[in-house]
Image (spheres, rainbow, N blue to C red):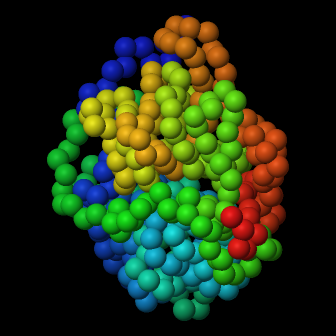
Amino acid sequence: MSTGYNPDFDPTGIEGGVDTQTIPWIALAQPAGLALKPLRASRETGLFTAVLRLRAGTALPRAVHLGAMDMLVLSGRLNYRGGDLAASCGPGTFGYVPANTRVEGMHADEDTELLVTCHGPIAFLGADGRTITSILGSMDIERAARAHGVALVPSTLAECMQQRAAPVRAEPLAMTAGDAAALVTGPASAIGGALDAHPHFVDTRALPWLVNPDTPDVGLKILRVSEETGFVSVIVRHNGVAPPHYHLGAADFMVLAGRIGYRAGPPEGYGPGVWFYEPAGARHDATQRLTDEDLIYTANLFGPIQFDSGRGTPIAFVFSWMTYKAMADAAGSHLLRSSFAGDASLLAWAPLGSG
């Protein structure tokens, strides 16, 4: 029986979305100029998620990503300097940095905010380009949250039963001051750098919405598919009601536009800036938009989603990384292989000025 995955699980505690607007910006001592809103940190895998902020003029030093990272620029403009990842990234830019990649430095041309998921620590280097001066990892995220009274999103179904902590201090994201949907649906803009040489940064506005016949009210912009881990990154336009489903692998989401009706959530749902983490085994009997505007959110899927027609009913279909790859191929929106040797990611790509 499908109910065997999480029998009698009916969360009433901290499970659900966390509003990033109610989390304070926490400045880091090193590297200087970087502040963050901590969202989740895994003690088991070292993965962490946060919203980062760099003030205009901030320059971050060279760094080595000891684990892979994906990001979405929410506001401002960030330049990756030199090396294989040279690019100028504005609002709506999705980026993917493989593990063990050296970044030659970053510079914020404007106040910049970005959502990042890091699968391992980032080691920042000194002026000699070799000495490690600081490391940002999941323990640092956890320590910063604890020091400022911020409750991190739970990582397991059992932890979801904790009581929700009161908000600490409201500090809104810049993207909520305007039309956040334009991040991924507005006219595409030319992103500078060597984007014709590799697909590791892409303007999501230049990508088409893909629709699967099994879920006609849901459009997807497929950003990354890993043939090694099965991880998938997408932008979702969700204008219907999703069938009942289990998250066989964990997933996370951030609402960019509209309001989402969600298990364990308030009647008015959740709006832009709310971030969710779905522990492996979580079930949704229905998920839907609550207003007439497009419901748009980011999604990282760390395993398949199994759909049915109700608790205890047979499996109707399963979405895995193979489903998303097949969707992209069928639509002629082919994914390109990572330009880094040994990295098994397939990445969205659009030529400069497209869209």
Q: Quadrant location of residue 327?
A: top right
Q: Position of residue 31 (x, y in %)?
A: 42, 79
Q: Is residue 132 above or below residue 169?
A: below
Q: Position of residue 69 (x, y in %)?
A: 58, 61
Q: Position of residue 112 (x, y in %)?
A: 43, 75
Let me know if residue 43 appears in the view.
no
Side of 64 where 352 appears, left or right: right
Q: Position of residue 289 (x, y in %)?
A: 42, 37
Q: Single out the residue that lies furthest toward the bottom.
A: 127
- Is 126 in front, or is 261? 261
Give the residue drawn at x 58%, y 42%.
Answer: 301
Q: Is residue 284 above or below residue 72?
A: above
Give the residue drawn at x 68%, y 64%.
Answer: 355
Give the residue drawn at x 62%, y 68%.
Answer: 188
- Is 304 in front, or is 73? 73
- Is 149 in front, or is 20? 20
Quadrant where the N terminus sits is top right
Give the residue drawn at x 47%, y 46%.
Answer: 294
